[in-house]
Amino acid sequence: MKKIAFLLAALLLLTAGLAGCGGNDGGADAPQDPQADVQEPAGDAAADTGDAAPAADGTLVMGTEATFPPYEFTDADGSITGIDAEIAAAIAEKLGMDLEIKDMAFDSLIPAVQGGSIDFAMAGMTVEPERAESVDFSASYATGVQVVIVPEDSEIASIDDLAGKIIGVQSGTTGDIYCTGDYGQDSVRQYNNGALAVAALLNGQIDCVVIDNEPAKNFVSANTGLKILDTEYAVEDYAIAISKDNPELLDQVNAALEELKADGTLDEIISKYIPAE
Ligand code: GLN
């Protein structure tokens, strides 16, 4: 399966000591956008998940990159919303804590988790071996698929046609890691977010964009002249990244996720944003 091939490719990259391209370089990047979006407090919900003491001041700080609909995006009021924001709010409520969301570049998220400026990162983030060396991942709460966006009249008909093409990706994402591994750095253009990559595709600066399927659908329906190739590049699990120094929070988040799965809240949130086809 493709997935295994790409995980292997990622592992090989690691072994070869080329890990630096993966956006996991220990915190050199300052957050792109320091503005934080404070969600409504979770109210006085009882902390019914786990016995460990909740993080310091009763506020859970989530980091995300908020141009990744339907997982995270900014609504008309300027608040960050979407699947991840709602699941995070439900987790915070279970923990009896308030939720604050900070928006930053995707490749700043893992360094921010490691540095402690956020409690966790939730950003449609794929469980990936190189990342798992830097942070712990919760249980998975969703599946993602890497797909290829091309102009409607593109000569690219399948993954096999990507060789020799210029591929746009969001910097530090698995799309970036896989494409750089498969086609080489010279074939890949890295953008700060998916929207910028899609804008470059519309301008004819690149031949395609490799990105997760649900944001891809959003970008394609918001713009004319684009389509998604039928073939899947890789199938992935999304999870929440938490500091290796905070196993209590990892346990609490996993316990909360389990409850939210069992009582149907997780499915409810996901199907609100991704209606069944
Ligand atoms: N799922 C991809 C990754 O984890 C992309 C996530 C994103 O761009 N927010 O790398």
Image (cartoon, rainbow, N blue to C red):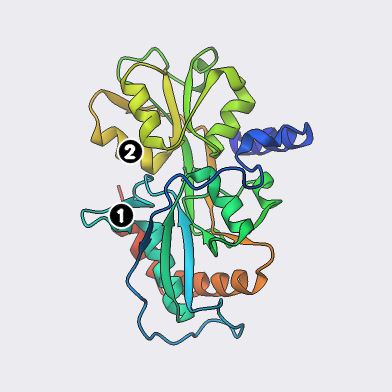
Is 170 positioned to the left or the right of 66 in the image?
A: right
**Can residue 5 be seen?**
no
Identify the secondary structure beneath mark 1: helix
Q: Position of residue 73 (x, y in %)?
A: 33, 50
The residue at 33%/38% (across/down) is 217
| Residue in the foreground of this view, choosing between 115 and 166 | 115
Q: Residue at x 31, y 36 (%)?
A: 219
For the residue pair 44 and 9, the one nearer the viewer reads as: 44
Q: Amino acid at mark 2?
A: Lys
Asked whether the viewer can see residue 123, the reply is yes
> Which quadrant does the N terminus fall into?
top right
Instruction: Please tell me whether residue 264 is drawn above or below residue 66 in the rendered image.
Output: below
> Please, is residue 39 above or below residue 127 in the view?
below
Residue behind mark 2: 217
Which residue is the site of mark 1? 273
**Residue sitting at 21 percent across and 53 percent down?**
76
Residue 91 on image: x %, y %:
46, 72
